[in-house]
Image (cartoon, rainbow, N blue to C red):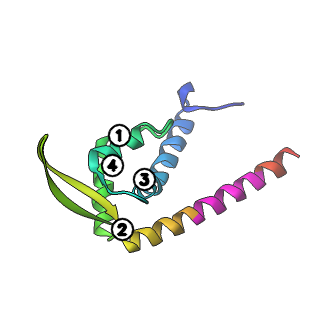
């Protein structure tokens, strides 16, 4: 039987939500790998990823937590288009965390694929 959160299955919807939440930190740190970004640009980038389904109310608290953990730093710059903007960028510890999370994710994906191949053969 095939389950998807499109089918209204509570288990599938909850599992998908938990998976997305667990990957959000990796996604945010990855977005900041090579550039510093204004908070709203981070939200827009994440929103464009198919299947991620996030909101500003999820991203900004996460950015604050990443700042408290010293994984990102912030600078505030005046904007000619309105109020000052807060920009986020990776710190050296944030880069180390991203490298660790990426390696852990890749290892986990490989392990799951190995299980799936064994289960189907």
> Between disc 1 and disc 4, whose residue precedes?
1
User: Which stretch appears magenta?
Assistant: 103-115
Query: Residue 74 bears which disc, if any?
Result: none
Residue located farthest toward the top when viewing the structure as drawn = 7
Query: Residue 44 bears which disc, if any?
Result: 1
> Between disc 1 and disc 3, whose residue precedes?
3
Determine whether the residue tagged by mark 2 lies in a helix, strand or loop. Answer: loop
Q: Does residue 70 belong to the magenta stretch?
A: no
Mark 4–mark 3 Cα distance, whole angstroms, equals 12 Å
Q: Residues within 10 Å of mark 1 (few under 14, many from 20)?
A: few
Q: Residues within 10 Å of mark 4 (few under 14, many from 20)?
A: some
Tag 1–tag 2 contact (CB < 8 Å): no
Which mark is nearer the camera, 4 or 3?
3
Position of residue 6 in the picture relative to residue 75 (left or right): right
Q: Does residue 104 belong to the magenta stretch?
A: yes
Q: Which residue is mark 3?
A: 31
> Between disc 4 and disc 3, whose residue precedes?
3
Please state the horizontal and vertical placement of residue 67, each as a whole percent of the image: 29, 65
Which mark is nearer the camera, 3 or 2?
3
| Residue 54 shows up from this direction | no
Could you say which quadrant of the image residue 48 lies in? Answer: top left
Mark 1–mark 2 Cα distance, whole angstroms, equals 21 Å
Q: Which residue is mark 2?
A: 71
């Amino acid at each position: 039987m095939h389950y998807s959160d499109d089918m209204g299955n509570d288990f599938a919807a909850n599992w998908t939500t938990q998976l997305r939440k667990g990957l959000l930190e990796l996604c945010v740190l990855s977005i900041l790998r090579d550039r510093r970004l204004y908070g709203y640009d981070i939200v827009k980038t994440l929103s464009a990823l198919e299947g991620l389904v996030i909101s500003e109310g999820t991203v900004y608290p996460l950015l604050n937590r990443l700042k408290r953990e010293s994984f990102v730093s912030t600078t505030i710059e005046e904007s000619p288009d309105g109020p000052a903007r807060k920009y986020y960028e990776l710190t050296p510890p944030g880069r180390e965390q991203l490298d660790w999370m990426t390696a852990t994710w890749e290892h986990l994906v490989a392990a799951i694929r190995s299980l799936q191949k064994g289960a189907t053969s």
